[in-house]
Image: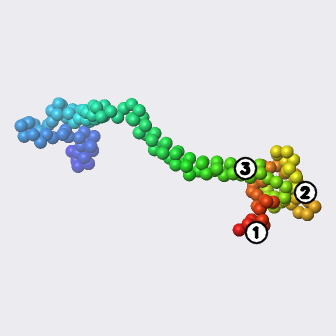
Amino acid sequence: MSGRTEYAFSVVFPKPMRNINPANNNGLTSPEESSNMFITPAWAQEASDAVSNTTGEGGVMGLLGPIAPILIVFFIFYIVVIRPQNRRMVEHRKSLDNLQKGDKVVTGGGVLATVRKLHGDEEIELEIAPGVIVTALRGTLMSIRETKASPAGEAKK
């Protein structure tokens, strides 16, 4: 055979594994020895399962292990984002409930206005310029700049 043919033949039909054991005359491994190589991972897996069963990793703690990081992230998200937002919403709602005639407010569109009249729980009458009166919903107000009760000096601070 030529060199190329011999190489191709050796790739397609590799030589059997050689045994290092000098007691074996032909140098080939026996089927029992070569099959042990593939059984070892299965035995190792069975042994690790036996160890994990004796350590008690099953049950509630076994289930809680993978879920714990998700719960921790959700808790941090709640503390950092949700609680402060809820507090701001409650404060904003209280300030809208305490709205009085003469308070200066900012609407959702950024218009500065003065409260002229309160029409029930939802509507208010705003004066955005001398003689220009607009009716708006309470929910559209973004903030209260100064109240009638507070002095003008405190609102500018």
Crowd tier of the residue under label 3, counting other residues whose Cα lies within 10 Å: few below 14, some 14–19, many 20 or above: few
What color scheme is it? rainbow
Q: Nearer the viewer, mark 2 or mark 3?
A: 3
| Residue contact between numbered discs 3 and 1, judged by CB atoms under 8 Å | no
Q: Position of residue 5 (x, y in %)?
A: 25, 45
CA–CA distance between discs 2 and 3? 25 Å
Does residue 138 lie above or below 59 as drawn?
below
Residue shown at 23% from the left, 49% from the top: 3
Name which of mark 1 and mark 2 comes first in the sequence.
2
Mark 2: secondary structure: strand
Amino acid at circle 3: Lys
Name which of mark 3 and mark 1 comes first in the sequence.
3
Residue shown at 32% from the left, 33% from the top: 56
Q: Which mark is residue 133?
A: 2
Is 114 displayed left or right of 94 in the figure?
right
Amino acid at circle 1: Gly
> Which sits in the foreground, 41 or 116?
116
* Residue 42 makes an appearance in the image: no
Q: Position of residue 12 (x, y in %)?
A: 27, 40
Residue at mark 3? 94
> Which sits in the foreground, 46 or 133?
133
Image quarter in which the N terminus is found: top left
Q: Which mark is residue 153?
A: 1
CA–CA distance between discs 1 and 2? 26 Å
CA–CA distance between discs 3 and 1? 23 Å
Q: Which mark is residue 137?
A: none
Q: Position of residue 87 (x, y in %)?
A: 64, 50
Does residue 99 lie above or below 36 as drawn?
below
Is 64 displayed left or right of 7 in the figure?
right
Crowd tier of the residue under label 2, counting other residues whose Cα lies within 10 Å: few below 14, some 14–19, many 20 or above: some
Is 61 displayed left or right of 124 in the figure?
left
